[in-house]
Image: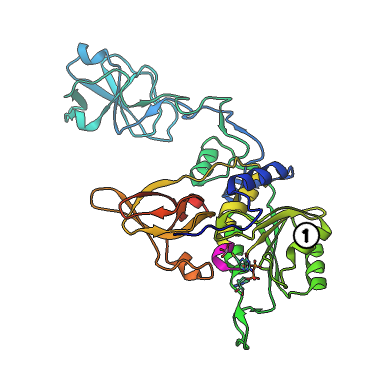
Amino acid sequence: MASCDTTPGMRTLDDALQTIIGQILPLTESELLDIAAADGRVLSADVLSTMSVPPADNSAMDGYAVRIEDLTEYDRLEVTQRVMAGDPMGQPLEPGTCARIMTGAMIPPGADTVIMQEDAEVSNDGTIRVRAAIKPGSNIRKAGEEIEPGQQVLQAGRRLRAADLGLLASIGVGSVNVVRRIRVALMATGNELVRPGVPLQPGQIYESNSFVLASLLRRMGCEVIDFGIINDDIDALRQAFLNADTQADLVISSGGVSVGEADLSRQILAELGSVELWKLAIKPGKPFAFGRLPTSFYAGLPGNPVSAMVTFHQLVVPMLRRLAGEEVKPLLKLDAMVDEKIRKRPGRMDFQRAIVWKDDEGVFRARALPRQGSSLLTTMSQSDAYIVLAADSPGVDAGEYVKVVLFDGLLT
Ligand SMILES: Nc1nc2c(c(=O)[nH]1)N[C@H]1C(S)=C(S)[C@@H](COP(=O)(O)OP(=O)(O)OC[C@H]3O[C@@H](n4cnc5c(N)ncnc54)[C@H](O)[C@@H]3O)O[C@H]1N2
Ligand code: MOO
């Protein structure tokens, strides 16, 4: 029978997130940036359009601008003008005439419908005959049909995506106010750690967490202040925490948050500020700590590389979103069928690394990697999703459905 994880004092992930969201207030400082430079940044103010989009009625097709009633009154229409996209307004349409028009060109006064050229038969005498039944108003994009003056196009708290930058450009906005970059101090703790590039001595390992975390932080638009490796020495750690606190909005360390004799991070956090959370019912990531330093927040990630990533995704990303004034929404979870059984000990919510694909019948399938140790960084590199198993779940059998969170959906 599966035994339970009975670690005392473990908080659920939801409970922890509530504490974090409740304690953190969004930053209030902002900066004005060109829209190209604002990619991935968070708007600090609503953006309202001062103009109509499109600015004028224009053609959605290459063809002929006509007056719809002329189609019943005249067998052929004379092409009397030609309007291209970018041209000034054409001449008013006289009865029995039409305008050659290109996609994006302004509709001349009097015209109310565009015939696509495939529906027009062109004669050498400069007239056309319309071959198809046409609905009045066809192929015209009306001024303001997408955006009207005064309309809010983007809301404060929006993390700008590619389409948003285009949208801003389309209403003539060249620069926007965004929340200033969140400054994050990053440190890796542990006497065993060395940076790649030097040979390992017995007992040492290469430090990898800060490379992973710095990459994730930059993807979130943060300014990373890298404090490198700090030894398990109480004075060195205290000094690093104090320095980091003066420079950053959020201090993140990895390692040293568990219960071992060199696990000093929490001790220093308690001494300099307050421990608001410690020990979560998640696997991996149990020893995660959250608290306050004199002027910044602190997140203590477990040293195991997978634990550090899982806690970053589940807890640090919401912290960063909250600091930036974004709405913190639950992650989108998909249902996928497992093709092999998964066993788990009840007690902690489990984040198993998995491969996800769609089978020939269109069903999402997931398979947990065979090894799930929290020290195995290869499992993060070789997978594309987390299978999320509830704390009380004993696991699932082959053919049952599980919840999966795709790494792509994590936006980091
Ligand atoms: N008696 C107990 N021991 C442990 C418990 C427990 O509940 N009781 N929890 C285990 C769990 S779960 C985790 S997770 C780890 C986390 O411990 P720490 O956060 O204190 O991390 P360390 O002990 O410093 O390191 C753990 C592991 O990760 C390696 N590491 C650390 N930093 C890095 C880095 N920057 N890059 C690469 N690898 C790193 C480190 O060498 C250790 O092997 O505690 C368990 N123990
Ligand atoms: O929580 Mo630890 O992160 O299980 O390995």
Magenta: predominant secondary structure element?
A: helix
Label 1, ligand 1: CB separation under 8 Å: no
In the figure, residue 206 lies in which quadrant?
bottom right
Relative depth, front residue between 153 and 5: 5
Q: How many numbered marks does the figure carry?
A: 1
At a point 30% along the width and 52% down the height, the residue shown is 399
Is residue 377 visible in the rendered image? The answer is yes
Left or right: 351, with 226 as reference point: left
Q: Is residue 305 magenta?
A: yes
Looking at the rendering, in which quadrant would you find the N terminus?
bottom left
Relative depth, front residue between 257 and 306: 257
At a point 83% along the width and 72% down the height, the residue shown is 235
The x and y percentages for residue 195 are: 63, 78
Q: Where 55 falls versus 311 (above or below)?
A: above
Left or right: 342, with 248 as reference point: left
Q: Give the extent of the magenta segment.
A: 303-308
The x and y percentages for residue 72 are: 20, 12
The x and y percentages for residue 161 are: 52, 46
**Residue designated by label 1:** 269
Please name the amino acid that badge 1 sits on: Leu
At a point 63% along the width and 37% down the height, the residue shown is 156
The x and y percentages for residue 35 are: 59, 46
Q: Is residue 111 magenta?
A: no
Is residue 215 visible in the rendered image? The answer is no
Q: Residues within 10 Å of mark 1 (few under 14, many from 20)?
A: many
Relative depth, front residue between 247 and 245: 245
Describe the element under mark 1 as helix, strand or loop.
helix
Left or right: 329, with 178 as reference point: left
Name the quarter showing ligand 2: bottom right
